[in-house]
Amino acid sequence: MNFKLLGGILLVVGTTIGAGMLALPVATAQLGFWGSTVLLVSCWAVMTTCAFLFIEVNLWFPAHSNLVSMAGATLGKAGQAVTWVVYLVLLYSIICAYIAGGGDLFHYILTTHGVNISQGASSILFTALFGFIVYRGIRSVDYVNRGLMFGKLGALFLLICLIIPFITPTNLNSGEFSHIIAPSSLTITAVSFACLMIIPSLRSYFGNDIKTLRKAVFIGSLIPLCCYISWDMVIMGVVPLDGVPGLRAILSSSNTNSDLVFALTSILQTSSITFLAKFFTSICMATSFLSVSLSLSDFLADGLKVKKQGISGNIIIFGATFLPPATLVIFYPHIFLLGLQYAGISVFISLIFACENIFSGNALGK
């Protein structure tokens, strides 16, 4: 078995299946299950196509080149400056969402076990614990991510099997297809398939084995599509659209993740489902945080021309990676869905620049 390919696939899956998955059934609740499935398949097709286009652009440049170098060579200084802003907003927004969601879940789990700490302290604990793994580099992230991903996918499979008997046709057929162009539904669904940021890191990890890189990206993007459709089915089939607990009420809540876990546990009242739901939602945050933080650190190293070596280089890169989002979450702890919405907007802008890179590169004879 090609364990490096497996690791690459799981890194792509870990990047995509995270906070966006937890938010999907809430953000697309007004669409209903069938409308959300159409939106999921459409966004998967667009985002996977763009991922392969992004690979082609990245292959025109030396290894370890990230979006800053790519934009500078194809779009000039102005395009490079805009890319800096858009990509930082994208990655910082996603990491803010993960820190907020991970801190919320840490706080919920610790509180239920009699450990009372503030939500800000929970967010700091989450960032420090998994930030240290990112600090150790992509090999450490790969190995830790493999273990977490097997646990996450196993928990998801068991959760789906246990919840399916509780699905009701009334809940599953609720919602209106006319909400498919709702901004929050579209942006959060799009960012749930965003794996562009991990591609430069994977390209460096695989070296010249481009065939394996493409295979990892395709399989790694197909697995989340199947998981998202299954997850939407069980959540929308069990948790009603209206009422308390209901998906509309959770959408307007400031503690989306813990409220979703609470809704499942209060409706189903099954200890095994309660445990698996807490376990699964916690790992979702962890795996995506690892992948996206690694991507941001590589992006900053390329943009700032600082190698992630030595004490000074690591302090600069990892300080710039974790301090801004952690500080923002401490002062604004309830920005989970808002962070994902900003990330979704940035994804669309990034896709425009990726396509522009393709056209500019062709014009330059790349």
Image: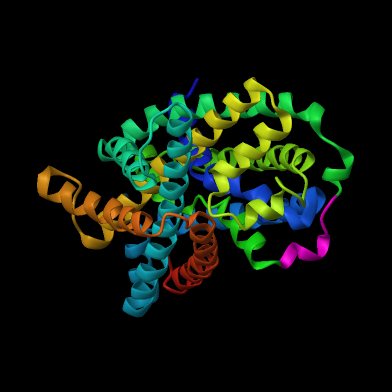
The answer to whether residue 113 is above or below residue 198 is above
Name the magenta segment's main secondary structure.
Answer: helix
In front here: 179 or 257?
257
Looking at the rendered structure, the number of numbered marks drawn on it comes to: 0
Location of residue 220 by image quarter: top right
Indicate left or right for 166 with 6 as reference: right
User: Which residue does the image show at 72% across and 29% down from the upper left?
Assistant: 268
User: Which residue does the image show at 43% across and 37% down from the upper left?
Assistant: 106
Indicate left or right for 225 with 309 as reference: right
The answer to whether residue 49 is above or below residue 205 is below
Indicate left or right for 341 with 166 as reference: left
In front here: 135 or 366?
135
Q: Is residue 240 visible?
A: yes
User: Which residue does the image show at 49% across and 30% down from the upper left?
Assistant: 112
Location of residue 39 by image quarter: bottom right
In front here: 172 or 244?
244
Q: Is residue 216 located in the magenta-colored stretch of the structure? A: no
In front here: 190 or 123?
123
- Which contiguous range is marked in magenta? 174-181
Percent across and percent down for residue 34 are: 82, 50
Q: Is residue 44 visible?
A: no
